[in-house]
Image (cartoon, rainbow, N blue to C red):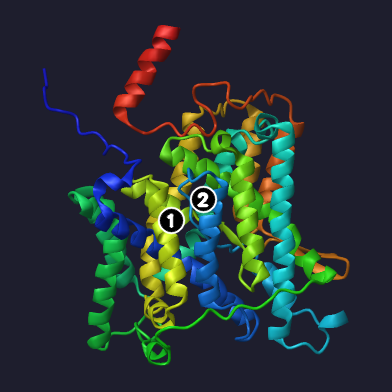
Amino acid sequence: MNDTPIKTERAPIYDASVLGLPKMLLLGLQHMFAMFGATILVPILVNGFFHGEGLSIQVTLFFAGIGTIFFHLCSKLQVPAFLGSSFAFLGGFAAVAELKSGIFAGMTYGEKLPYACGGIFVAGILYLLLASIIRAIGVNRVMHYLPPVVTGPMIICIGLGLAPVAVGSASANWPLALIALGSIILFNIWGKGMYRIIPILLGVVIAYCSAFLFHSMGITNADGSPILNLGAISQSSLVGLPPFQMLKFDLTAILVMAPIALASMMEHIGDMSAISATVGKNFIKTPGLHRTLIGDGLATSIAALFGGPANTTYGENTGVLELSKVYDPKVIRIAAVFAILLSFLPIVAAIIATIPAAIIGGVSFILYGMISAIGIRNLVENQVDFKKSRNLIVAATILVCGLGFAKGITFAVGGASVTLTGLSIAAIVGTILNAVLPGNDYEFGNTDHDTYSGLAMDPIKDEQLDTKQKETN
């Protein structure tokens, strides 16, 4: 008989205070790094649409932190989610930038930006509307139409849809990307103690040191550009207020931006299910989906009120939760404070912004893949029966729509162009198919393998569950 002990997964940590304040600060810094690249990428891209007169990185970081804290307050300090810039609204920003009729005729790009923010403000209000509906009729009735066969493929699409972004960033300098990726894998699998808990932070630091070394040796990126661009650092002040600006309203801009909330709200539900599955707690029921939607909606509207982008729960940080096994929401709030402080330090933000895209790409290989893997786990743990044709049809349609409509679908509403992203198309089509096809017998909260129960992938717990089910049968 083989008495060799079986190596199990590390026990999750729900109270990070047992690690001590210094380690908690490091964990918060790791979450800040995880969100940073994608969060500042949104204003960078929007500035391209508005020819340099778009969103501010400082304002974006400020409201990422403020929005995260608002979200935690609304969700009773229970959900370990970070809110960063939403990519879903990029198409809307691009559309508003090119509006040239009505009041927009003769406007500069900078003058159009507040109207885009006004549309985002209304989009945030739509979150509150959905939250009110859930509050009124109950989460069980609403989630009956969003069973695992819908949300699982949606989570998969969120991760796989970001995969080209990871590859595109990594391709700028594959050696750097592989150093970041390899370091994360090394510390996560073979690291000891704290080194195993902060693999992403270590991966970024090691890869950045390598980038500095390569740069000093005269090595360039694949396209011949320098690996590091340190010019912006010398031009940045040490301390400075974020350049806030007030929003403005126009019906055309609202019609362009507000409908995108359909996609972002579905993404929110998918992210909440992913976080629940990761942490092992049912956040859809407690503190409740209506509370998390209110938090996300308020964060989005408050950011737009002062010239910031829409916020959304970040899958990158869900990936960090999965890797670190530290599920304490206090760590996320520390990351939020770091983001706020960073927004008042332009020079520090400029230094961090010098992290090469290839490093972010290498990190994203892990984080985006983790999101899709969580979606697969959601399907497996909830025992979705793919022998049923209806389930195959629903899942297949969601996957094809979510990944196939890479550029979305654009159509005119009231003289303005409205773009539905692939994710929003997948959400709408999948939800409708699930509702109209016969055989939707799912009842939220009535089974051991509940949709958002987030059963831990722990051998001991799995064995206990199997024993319990055998005794029941």
Q: Amino acid at mark 1?
A: Arg
Judging from the image, what secondary structure is the residue with disc 2 in? helix
Q: Are marks 1 and 2 in contact (CB under 8 Å)?
A: yes
Which residue corresponds to mark 2? 72
The answer to whether residue 406 is above or below residue 373 is below
Judging from the image, what secondary structure is the residue with disc 1 in? helix
Q: Name the quadrant containing residue 43.
A: bottom right
Horizontal side of residue 213 vs 381, given as left or right: left
Residue 299 spot, x, y in % from top left? 60, 59
Q: Amino acid at mark 2?
A: His
Q: Give the CA distance from mark 1 to mark 2.
A: 8 Å
- How dense is the environment of label 2, judged by Cα within 10 Å: few (below 14), some, or many (20 and up)? many
Q: Which mark is residue 333?
A: 1
Q: Quadrant of the N terminus?
A: top left
Residue 439 spot, x, y in % from top left? 69, 24
Q: Quadrant of the C terminus?
A: top left
Nearer to us in this view, 226 or 247: 247
Q: How many marks?
A: 2
